Amino acid sequence: YSQALERHEYWRLITHGFLHANPVHLLVNMLCLVLWGGLLERRVESFYFTVIYLSGLIIGALVSKFSHPGPYLGVGASGAISAVLGALLCLRILGKIDLSWNFFVTNIGLNVVLAASSSRIDWQAHFGGFAAGVICCACLDIVEKALPWALRCKFPEFAKMNSFVAFVIAV
């Protein structure tokens, strides 16, 4: 909803990712999440996957909001899904994941063609999410190099996720 920030409805920066225009929209988003999400989650673990995913969801929504001149409705997790693909590309550039360049050419190419094929697809959210995924993953890599104990601690993943959820609820 284009007036969400003006009305201080900040939760809409996240909740739009749980709404979809139709079953095909939901199916395409979930298919991409299955194809790309497992690859990223195995490399960065669930907590950092969640951080990347949420950053793509929020930044994609903000880019979409500030790039639309008039009223609009935004639904779908495309920004977050694009963040997953952007993070995979960042890991490939950093040499931390062994995926072929054809994987990226094909998937990014299909994403661009799909976004360009319909005026109803919010390519701004795709682009914002993709950029957020690249930047967030690069920042996590910098922090990992500077403070290796911070990102690769022996603290169990379920404890990190539950702490994160508790923090979000408290905020």
Image (spheres, rainbow, N blue to C red):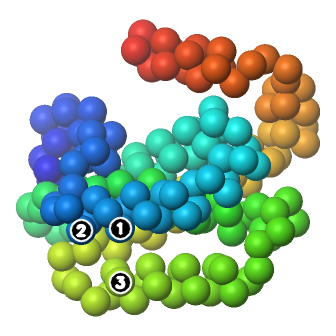
Number of residue marks? 3
Q: Is residue 65 rendered to the left or right of residue 112?
A: left
Q: Which sits in the foreground, 139 or 36?
A: 36
How busy is the neighbourhood of tag 3: few (under 14 within 10 Å), some, or many (20 plus)? few
Q: Nearer the viewer, residue 5 or 138?
A: 138
> Residue 125 lies in what quarter of the image?
bottom left
Residue at the image position 17 percent from the left and 69 percent from the top: 69
Q: Kindly identify the residue that appears in the image at 45 percent across and 54 percent down.
A: 80
Secondary structure at badge 2 equals helix
Q: Position of residue 15 (x, y in %)?
A: 27, 39
Q: Amino acid at mark 3?
A: Leu
* Residue for point 63% across, 36% down: 46
Q: Is residue 142 left or right of residue 159?
A: right
Front position among marks 2 and 3: 2
The picture places residue 34, in percent across and down from the top left corner, at: 51, 58
- Mark 3–mark 1 contact, CB under 8 Å? yes
Q: Amino acid at mark 1?
A: Val
Instruction: Compute the Cα span from label 3 to label 1.
Output: 11 Å
The reply to whether the C-beta atoms of the residues labelled 2 and 1 are less than 8 Å apart is yes
The disc label shown at residue 28, or none: 1
Q: Which residue is under mark 2? A: 24
* Disc 3: which residue: 114
- Quadrant of the rendered structure where residue 121 is? bottom left
Estimate the x, y position of residue 18 in percent, counting from the top left: 28, 45
Q: How many angstroms separate mark 2 from mark 3 (CA)? A: 13 Å
CA distance for labels 2 and 1: 6 Å
Secondary element at image label 1:
helix
Judge left or right: residue 135 versus residue 60: right
